[in-house]
Amino acid sequence: MPTPDDMEQQFTLLTAVARYDELRLRDALAPPAGEPADDDGDARPLTRDEALELLALSEVIIRKASYGRQLAVRTARSAGASWTQVGAALATSKQSAWETHMRWLEEQGLSSTSTR
């Protein structure tokens, strides 16, 4: 079973979401445990490997969305948005938005001098 680290290289955010949605929908439509599946096969329960893939894909999506979110913060700041405005756009405080972005910059090994 591939790990999120493996899958992160294989999938873009868009393709990860598409596969996740396909598995999630099939899981939602599957009959409860112990009941027979429909003859059309669309509502068959997920296999163990597919259920684990669904979990791993959710982690890939979270990682990719978080990365994109921080790039958008950087873009907003470069375009002149204040930390108060960034915090409001993220439904958080300006302090929390700033701290999260600074942590992300450190994790990326990037300089934080131009983000204040």
Image: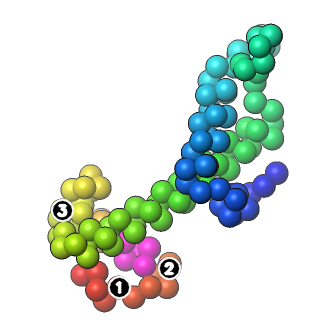
Of the two numbered discs 1 and 3 on the same chain, state the one appearing first in sequence: 3
Question: Under tag 1, what secondary structure?
Answer: loop
**Between residues 63 and 10, which one lies in front from this camera angle?**
10
Kind of residue at badge 2: Gln
Q: Which mark is residue 108?
A: 2
x, y percent for residue 97: 30, 65
Q: Residue at x 49, y 85 (%)?
A: 109
Q: Which residues are magenta?
A: 101-105
**Image colouring:** rainbow
Residue 46 appears at what percent x and percent y?
75, 30
- In magenta segment, residue 98: no
Q: Which mark is residue 85?
A: 3
The percent position of residue 19, horizontal first and vertical second, equals 65, 42
Q: Compared with residue 19, is residue 5 higher up or lower down, i.e. above or below?
A: below
The stretch drawn in magenta includes residue 104:
yes
Q: CA distance from mark 2 to mark 1?
A: 11 Å
Residue 95 makes an appearance in the image: no
10 Å crowding of disc 2: few (<14), some (14-19), many (20+): few
**What residue do we see at 18% from left, 73% from top?**
80
In this rendering, is residue 47 above or below 86? above
The residue that mark 1 highlights is 112
The quarter of the picture where residue 85 lies is bottom left
Amino acid type of disc 1?
Answer: Ser
- Res. 78 image quadrant: bottom left
Q: Residues within 10 Å of mark 3 (few under 14, many from 20)?
A: some
